[in-house]
Image (cartoon, helix red, strand yellow):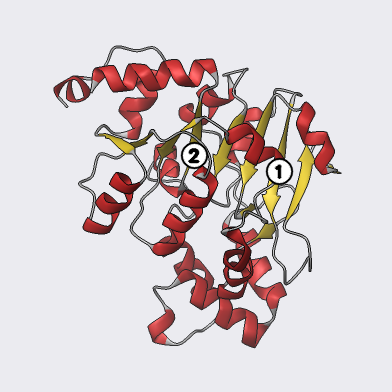
Amino acid sequence: MDTAVAAVLAGLSAGQVVPYLGPGVLALAGPACPLPASPQALVKHLTAKASVPHKLLGNLTAAAQFIENFKHRKTVAAAMREAFAPAVAPTALHRLLADIAGLPLIVHAWYDDLPQRALAGRGDWGMVQGVSQAEHQGVWCHHFDAAGTLTTPEAASAWTTLLYQPLGSVAPAGNFLVSDSDFVEVLTEIDIQTPIPAEVQRRRAGRQFLFLGCRFDDQLGRTFARQVMKRSSDQHYAVLPETPSRNEARFLAQHGIEVLALSLADFTACLAGEAMPAQALAG
């Protein structure tokens, strides 16, 4: 385990390992964090604002679709902005990743703005965010510079670090992919990579991915990870202290993802240069 962690840390420093952050990273913000840290927590927030059939209460995308159909898309967008409105400081992990000056690409597959906040002290980065076809017909993503100003796809080639948020984000413009119809549009084209920005495709080539705060126990999450990884390296890593489910284990094996069985807190300590935790050494 210590050899694999050391290889990941060296790869991050050299810009050869791409961090892929999921909602579980918010656990590092502590138990009092007001932001939804899972699809289950987010759907509770949305359904507290609008009634949906009981069978949809545990299904984020279906619940969002029901609200969109019967309350309007603006209701979904407003509830999403409210859910992720609290200002939360970046975690130590966000700050450490932002401090890797030569890191070419960070993928953030959740809706909070902690990565942007962590990168705010730099001026050499920008964002590419997925947008909903319901609000931006014919457009798959928007590009924003470090100041949060909408810019052109061509500008992205000059950024040292590109933050890719395939699901959108609360900041700077409150664009979200969250309903069934949002994902149907994207999934129709994602196999031929149309929704994946060209600069993301260029920067991922030959690189390894490191999944942090991600679980692969639903088809949607697996599909996005698979498509974002496409045409990269054939070896990747996932910090995953829990025992993978059968579907997760199959996905990990299929895509050459080696499990680092330590907690996010322990991995963050390693990234900070602290001594390897005993449990990591034991792994």
The residue lying at 40 percent from left, 63 percent from top is 219
Tell me residue 215's x, y (percent): 36, 50
Regarding mark 1 in the picture, which secondary structure is present there? Answer: helix
As drawn, the label of residue 198 is: 1
The residue lying at 42 percent from left, 39 percent from top is 211
Tell me residue 91's x, y (percent): 49, 32
> Of the residues shown, which amino acid type is indicated by label 2?
Tyr
| Viewer-nearest residue: 255 or 45 | 255
Q: Residues within 10 Å of mark 2 (few under 14, many from 20)?
A: many
Identify whether 151 is placed above or below 45.
Answer: above
Tell me residue 103's x, y (percent): 59, 23
Q: CA distance from mark 1 to mark 2?
A: 18 Å
Residue indicated by mark 2: 20
Identify whether 25 is placed above or below 196.
Answer: above
Viewer-nearest of labels 1 and 2?
A: 1
Between discs 1 and 2, the one toward the N terminus = 2
